[in-house]
Amino acid sequence: MCVLKPGKCLILAVCRNPLSMACSLPSKPTGTAPYYGVSDKRMKFYCININRYFRYLMVFSFALITSVSYAGSPSLPDPLKAGWKGKQVCERLHEDAKKRILRCTFPPGTGHERHYHVAHFGYAISGGRVQMTNESGIKTLDLTTGSSYTSAGTLWHEVENTGDTTIIYLIVEDKISQHKTSPDD
């Protein structure tokens, strides 16, 4: 039910689906005055506009939630703050206004708790086998020493070294793109 407020009067119209623009006006007895001085045509216009704004609000809310999550979830730590069973696994090697460089070390049986990433470049100083869990599911990856990749960012993932070698990874984060994806910009 839509609550319409032309001027100072409240008018109720039945909306079949708030996400669509289809509304039906409540029936009124024959020979009665228009709805509080508002014509049927005008009332339908109010209902359609309210539905349109409701749709825009829903799309805007989804976009805002997605951008905040993508720029960094406030409930998840970044890779530097995320650890494994209370122990730090990454250390900051360098940080300036444009980039942050981390070195993460994962002995066998060690992992990286659930965390997010901004745009970054990764390089395996020492490879090995990891089990990675993210929104797509669980997969096992063999990281080759010297392999690299780039990422526009990761909503969340967690990894565990399931091999028998120590994995050392270098992460170079792009702080400029991090600011561009911020919802405040």
Image (cartoon, grey):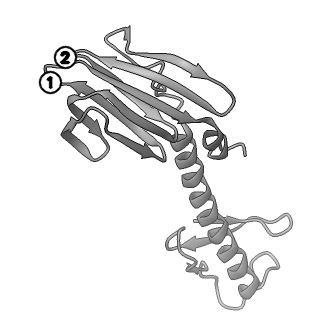
Q: What residue does disc 2 label?
A: 108
Q: Position of residue 40 (x, y in %)?
A: 71, 86
Q: Amino acid at mark 1?
A: Gly
Q: Which mark is residue 163?
A: 1
Nearest to N terminus: mark 2 or mark 1? 2
Q: How many marks?
A: 2
Q: Residues within 10 Å of mark 1 (few under 14, many from 20)?
A: some
- For residue 82, side relative to residue 9 (left or right): left
Residue at 20%, 38% (x, y): give it. 141
- For residue 133, side relative to residue 36 (left or right): left
Q: Position of residue 151 (x, y in %)?
A: 44, 45
Q: As rendered, which of 16 and 35 lies closer to the eye?
A: 16
Residue at 27%, 32% (x, y): give it. 145
Q: Which mark is residue 175?
A: none
Residue at 62%, 70% (x, y): give it. 51
Q: Amino acid at mark 2?
A: Pro
